[in-house]
Image (cartoon, rainbow, N blue to C red):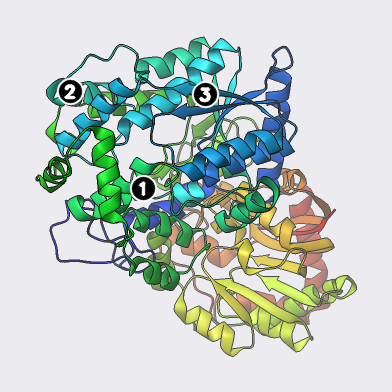
Amino acid sequence: MNNTEFQVCKRCVMDTTDPDIVFDENGFCNHCNDYFDNIVKHTYKGESSDKELAAIIDKIKRDGKNSKYDCVIGVSGGVDSSYVAYLAKQKGLRILAVHMDNGWDSEESVKNVRNIIQKLEIDYQSYVLDWEEFKDLQLSFLKASVPEIETPTDMAIPAALHKIAAENKIKYIISGGNYATEGILPKSWQYNGKDLKYLKAIHKQFGTRKLKNFPTFGHWSEIYYKFFKGIKMIYILNYVPYAKDKAVKILETELDWKYYGGKHYESRITAFVQGYIYPVKFNYDYRKATFSSLICEKQVTREEAFNELKKLPYNKETIEQDKQYIAKKFGLSLSELETYISQDAKTYRDYPNDEKKLAFIYNLYRRLFNKPKINTSVGGKYHQNCLICNSKRIKVLNGYEKDSLVRCQDCNFVFSQKIPKHEELVKYYEDTYTRDDYLSPITIKRYNEVLDQFEKYKKTNKLLDLGSGVGYFLEAAKQRGWEVYGTEFTDDAMTICKNKGAIMHQGPLDRTNYKKEMFDIITSFEVIEHINNPKEELPIYKEILRKGGVLYFTTPNFNSLERYILKGNYSAIKYPEHLSYYTKKTINILFRNNGFKKIKLEAIGFSLSRIRHSLKHQGNFKITESYDDEKIRRRFETNKLLRFSKKFINATLNLFSIGNSLKGLYVKE
């Protein structure tokens, strides 16, 4: 618990109104850290997401060929569910739309549902709750003084959808849930809506009538529908570039859809609970979670969010009228409603619940079926699948346990199973990478030889160098007339590169910083081994590189002679700096699977200095003018016989694929 003075995250807008919030040394909260470390991997990733969605849609159609419908979609009249119905129709799915009527629909939402059904020409079924039972249950949560007043609704919706799906032999429910707008939500603000023990405990203590007709959905129901009926939930919005403002414009233009005032405000009770009860009774503003998700998705700026948060979350002019409506609907007097709202706030922990039991069940399910754990902590996460071929058959690599290395049993790719936190990487690079490395004249010569290869690919005249360091290559490229762009982690490196005339972006590669097919060339000098999940990064390369453009990279070769000699002392193996370890075979699989064709790939080079350095365990390897390899390089450059010997040695190393460095040139097909 956080009992310190009020503090706001320096990246999103979450603050200490979440009692469980934790801040790192940069002032970033656990919510946005978790978003960037974990959740962002499950949002839209360009072409790879497009392919995944196409495959999902094809499977839904195949599995539904013997049924009248392909899928069930719950429609509330809100943005998310309305846009899901629109997308599913665009994809050619046969939809059974279901509206769960709990008696609280706003006029706008009713009209929206009607317009969606009519405009999209889809079949529709209404599932109407027993109002007297539902009212008694929801009123029990109000009397219990907990935030989860909408838990009865949150439980009834999946119960209704699964029941109707099973009755119609439909195998897929497409949900409007998504990480783009809902990726951040503190547990202290909204407890698990599937905890049947919690719901029954609240109703037993505060309810006045038996629940005979209310549709419950606990873990046993979920197991039954998932494993015995084979019904799956699909979150389609995680596979598309979902921007709520753009979705609203499409819905307004094509479906005569009308906005209703706020997230989930298509329901009168939700609007009142989130807009009034939460801030007045529980001292938190639900909008902060929504805005924080949108900030992480770059759909709003932090400044825009703060400006909106300055406004009251409810309408001051109509709030008394809203209270009268809510009280009357519940069968209460206004003073009774206000008494319940003014009672001391409680949490789900004050009542019997199955928190530990559910955590055990879901953790067991994730382990048995290799499902990722989402939005639970700030670090200590591990990959469960191969980063290239997605195989679940990964095995700890003997002798490399200290760096958490595993090998895929299907494609042989080696990688660190442990996933470093964002702040861990920033700290490492700030502490490790310095600005005074020696730049060899021979290296400058090699840069220009690489740039010579790029001349025939010039069209946009734009070059992007990933992990630019202190900008030596960018500087050489700029002198050759290229418009140069780069990426880096540390403030120091960013400043140096900008001073050399480069257009820089800080942090991991972000597709939103660049236009599609913008670059002729992307270079990656000793960078791809740093990437946490290459299968997700490569589609970005393809998206921002023009057709016929090329990607040039260098990276350590895991099959190198040096690694065979040194084994666990091999200096290139070090967490969290290096996370992926390639061979000719695995690097070629990665690029081929992502739409790149090999022009050239070689494994060359051998370093006596690195071997000696590794054997002495002398920390980070640092290049200087006097180090042995540099002296040898100068001799080889000036002696014809030695140059010939070098070519022969490299040819031999390449023939057996055991050179130190993989150097590749791939073209986008």
Instruction: Say whether residue 52 is visible.
Output: no
Q: Which residue is mark 1?
A: 271
Q: Relative to 73, is 612 above or below?
A: below
Q: CA distance from mark 2 to mark 1?
A: 23 Å
Q: Are marks 2 and 3 in contact (CB under 8 Å)?
A: no
For label 2, count other residues whose C-alpha is less than 10 Å away and answer few (under 14), some (14-19) or many (20+): many
User: Which residue shows up at 34% across the image and 50% down it?
Assistant: 378
Label 1 crowd (10 A; few <14 / some 14-19 / many >=20):
many
Of residue 1 and residue 138, the one placed in the foreground of this image is 138
Residue at horizontal 63%, vertical 56%?
Answer: 249
Q: Residue 126 — which label?
A: 3
Amino acid type, mark 3? Ser
Residue 611 in the image: above or below residue 351: below
* Of the image marks 2 and 1, the number of the one nearer the N terminus: 2
Circle 2 residue: 207
Which residue lies at the image location 62% right of the left edge and 57% below the top edge? Answer: 246
Q: Which mark is residue 15?
A: none
Report x, y in % for residue 272.
31, 47
Mark found first going from the N terminus, 2 or 3: 3
Q: Quadrant of residue 31?
A: bottom left
Task: Say what amino acid the circle numbered 1 marks.
Answer: Ala
Secondary element under disc 1, as helix, strand or loop, is helix
Query: x, y percentage for residue 257?
Result: 60, 48
Position of residue 107 measured from the top left corner of the image (x, y, whole percent):
47, 42
Label 3 secondary element: strand
Which amino acid does the dot numbered 2 rest on? Gly
Disc 3 crowd, CA 10 A, few/some/many (<14, 14-19, 20+): few
Residue 163 visible somewhere in the drawing: yes
Q: Position of residue 572 (x, y in %)?
A: 53, 57
Left or right, 400 with reference to 57: left
